[in-house]
Image (cartoon, helix red, strand yellow):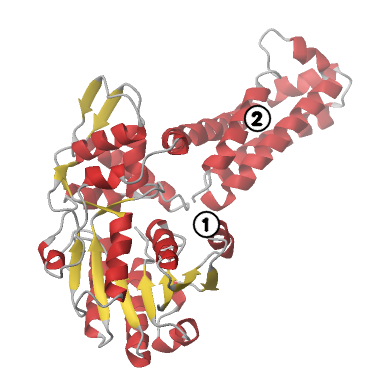
Amino acid sequence: MARVLILGAYGLIGAELARQLRQAGHEVTGMGRDPATARKVLPGLAWRFGDLRALRAPGDWAALLGGQDAVVNAAGALQDGPEDALEAVHHHAVMALAEACAAGGVKLVQISASGASEAASTHFMRSKARGDGAVLASGAEAWVLRPGLVLARTGYGGTALLRMLAAVPWVQPMTLGKVPVQTVGVDDLAAAVLAVLGGEVPAGRAYDLVETEAQRLRDVVQAMRGWLGFRPAKLHLPLPSLMLWPVTALSDLFGRLGWRGPLRRTAVKTLKGGITGDPAPWAQTGAARPRPMAESLAAMPARSEDRLAARMALLMPFVLVTLGLFWLLSGVIGLIQAEAAAGILTLEGWPRWAALGSVIGFALADIALALALAVRRYARRALWGMILLSLAYLGFASLFTPALWADPLGPLLKVIPQIMLALVALPMLESR
């Protein structure tokens, strides 16, 4: 059995590879950027930590590769952003890794993507192709595996998008429904990596890992809907692809704020071109072929938590936007109506300066929390801030203006469901 380092070991693919390679008897070490996420996803795994963006020379990999027989690179990013740099992660770091593997006699398995090509329409695919080329030209004993649309137990990325679409009640909105898609189950991808490490597959070339027959995207979503146990849609709603572009523009905008949504420009452009590959070269190796989509789904029955996660993922943007707008408008209206709001406190005996200062201060706090919620790295703290500030409002009002509890419009009672909505939003922020 081999000692294997898996890059991106807490990601959708990497985590499953780590589990299955360990079950097969390999000694697995994971590598990632975030210790907290790593130990949450795979708490029993040995870990090494580093940022691929900083590993740009072969010597940078020396300590990480020490004692390893093989490396599986399952790390990657969809689009440039505050925490992601495609060229650095997909090309420069991979080139340095491949050269280090060649010098140290370490096997290298590169997990790429079907459709990776220098002529591709997206930076994602082009940078992947440059990394693949560097691996194959390095002189290392290396393989490039290019999976199609990966079906996994965990909902993330493209898989999460499919589940969100399948969770829409009553109707099935669909654009690009005729786009061809070839899937691969994550179990079959893990089996391919095991076959490579076992010496069953010739080195020095790239292999597409896809099912034999392609299907339309709308059929994939329909199959996902059935897999999750949702009722068939009563109405299928085909939408023009032009409607995607405002959504992708908004997703890209929030992507710059750290939100890695599944409808960013790169994902949509990749999907528009189809997710397909050539299964023949892999079939010629004699290793087990990827199963059809129906068999992949049947091998991993959906659980109640999968249904719940799909519905929560669908609701998440609406919940966060609702909270953000509520707090933003609350603050803006508070500033506009500061004199009127301060008048309520002056009737209770407050000095005008104290009443007006309190109203303006709380209004600015509302606006600050709304803006913080829009930035991914601050979102959790913003939600807790909303909860705590809401409790402070209730306590403050109960002490100084208790009559508001009996107001027929219920201004204080309405704060309670807002607190509950913020509590519901907190687990939605969990990315793994």
Q: Nearer the viewer, residue 40 or 357?
A: 40
Q: Nearer the viewer, residue 197 or 139?
A: 197
User: Percent position (x, y) of residue 260?
Assistant: 42, 51
Q: Residue at x 30, y 75 (%)?
A: 198
Q: Residue at x 50, y 85 (%)?
A: 63
Q: Quadrant of residue 80?
A: bottom left
Residue that label 1 marks: 41
How many numbered callouts? Answer: 2
Q: Nearer the viewer, mark 2 or mark 1?
A: 1
Q: Secondary structure at mark 1?
A: helix
Q: Is residue 21 above or below residue 351?
A: below
User: Percent position (x, y) of residue 117?
Assistant: 18, 66
User: Percent position (x, y) of residue 83?
Assistant: 46, 62
Query: Residues under labels 2 and 1: Cα distance?
Result: 29 Å
Residue 49 disc label: none
Residue 260 visible, this angle: yes
Q: Nearer the viewer, residue 432 or 93?
A: 432
Residue that label 2 marks: 419
**The N terminus is located in which quarter?**
bottom left
**How would you rate the neighbour count of disc 1 (Cα within 10 Å): few for under 14, some for 14-19, many for 20 or more?**
some
User: Percent position (x, y) of residue 337?
Assistant: 66, 23
Q: Nearer the viewer, residue 66 or 259?
A: 66
**Image side of residue 357 versus residue 198, left or right:** right
Q: Secondary structure at mark 2?
A: helix
**Image side of residue 315 versus residue 219, left or right:** right
Q: What residue occupies the far top of the structure in this picture?
A: 408
Identify the amino acid type marked 1: Val
